[in-house]
Amino acid sequence: MAERFENILEECLERLRQGESMEQCLARYPEQAADLAPLLQVAAATQKTSSAVQPRPEFKERSRYEIQSQLHGKERKTEPKKTSFVGWMPRWAVAVVSVILVFLVAGTGTVAASTSSMPDDTLYPVKLATERARLGLTRGDIKKARVNVRLADRRVKEIVYLARKGDSRRLDKALLRLEGHMEAIEQVIEANADRPKVQEALTALKALLEERAAENEAAIEEATNNTDDPGILRRVLERYRQRYQSALGSGWRGSR
Amino acid sequence: MRRAQRREPEAFGQLYEEHFDRIYRYVMLRVRNQEDAEDITQQVFLKALEKIGSYRWRGMPFASWLFRIAHNLVVDYWKKKSREKVVAVAPEEIDEMAASPNDPAALAELNFDMKQLAAACDRLTDGQREIISLRFAGGLSVAESAKVMGKSEGAVKVLQHAALVKLRRILCPAGEEVNG
């Protein structure tokens, strides 16, 4: 019971953040309204008071200058180390573990069954593990990025599904995963932008990303029109757009 | 992000502009002193610049990573000031959550200034103050806040609930009408 109230409170806070009025929010939960109202009031007032706080412009400017001085003083002294997706494991170990995992699980047919599973299914962790294995086994940054484009498609489908079910908790997690895929794609595009040898593959990757983004955007927009809570999906759409536009970069002139 | 990790001024500048005000607001609410808040905010970005090469996604959004740096600096600050308080939610606060002295129909806007809010936050546990600062000053989601605090999302929601109950009691004691 207590756990459920915390979830309701968080859902109402999210709805307020999306622009819903307090009255509308409380009307959704008449039984909890008496407990919710004072908490939502104090949350709204805290948010309002906090957002009025601004750093002094001269401090912000001084701080910006300090950072810029540091940046210009020692540019590119530290190149990030290459690590595997598991992080602490060497690359070969990731590959071996991934192969074992895939073969062990694939034999039972569980992998195939998990592919279409959704975040509230029991097989969903298998789906995620299989995806991680697939990424680990894929050689080359650009090929990995293409896999991430496909995995982002899956996350979008899951988000649409969760929005229909009104499961905002799992939706938030799926959104974080989606952003993870998009960030990984962006990192590959940026890292390879100046490498003449891979420009053809990079252009193909961007075209794929643009094509998938158009379809995914349309799917999210359609779902927005068919849900009781369009605010959450609008936020998803906004963040998704920011991510793929950032990945494509300002210089991209694709098919659209 | 990759460009920022290569310390390209334009890319890092973008991250700076995107997060600076939020970090400042969070720190301000945590330390309640403008001079110290400015000092810590600047340290956050200098530290981020120093460590950005080691940042990896691994389920940790960049905003959470940055707020984690801010959180650690704030903790160090209070250690130095020897004013660290209890982090866990006290069992008796669970009972407090059940009470709701206010009428839900009375939805008049509640108002208080930063000084009152900071004073009220001073009476929260450290964990409660942290979640209020992350959520409402820093503008992080529950998932992002959970990453900063190293807690589960469920635990963060419990903490958020306790914090709001207590904040409400401090700012608007039972029987007192809200203004507006």
Image (cartoon, rainbow, N blue to C red):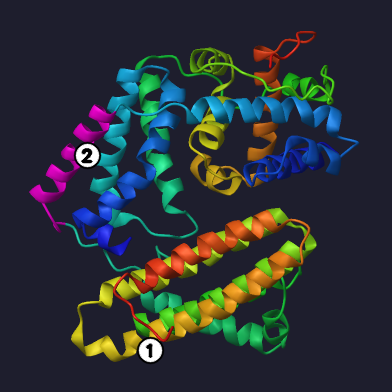
Helix or strand or loop: what does disc 1 sit on?
Answer: helix
Residue at the far left: name it.
Answer: A73
For residue A135, side relative to residue A11 (left or right):
left
* Image marks 2 and 1: residues in contact by CB distance under 8 Å: no
**Quick check: A175 above or below A184?**
above
Give whichever of discs 2 and 1 has the lower sequence position. 2
Instruction: Identify the residue under disc 1.
Output: A204
The label on residue B65 is none
| Chain hosting mark 1 | A
Q: Quadrant of residue A242?
A: bottom left
**What amino acid type should be assigned to the residue bearing mark 1?**
Ala
Q: Which residue is mark 2?
A: A64
Residue A73 placement (x, y as % from top left): 8, 48
Other-residue count near label 2 (Cα within 10 Å), few / some / many at <14 / 14–19 / ≥20: some
Residue drawn at point x = 23 percent, y = 28 percent: A58
Q: What percent of the width, then of the height, locates residue A110?
A: 71, 83
Quadrant the N terminus of chain A occupies = top right
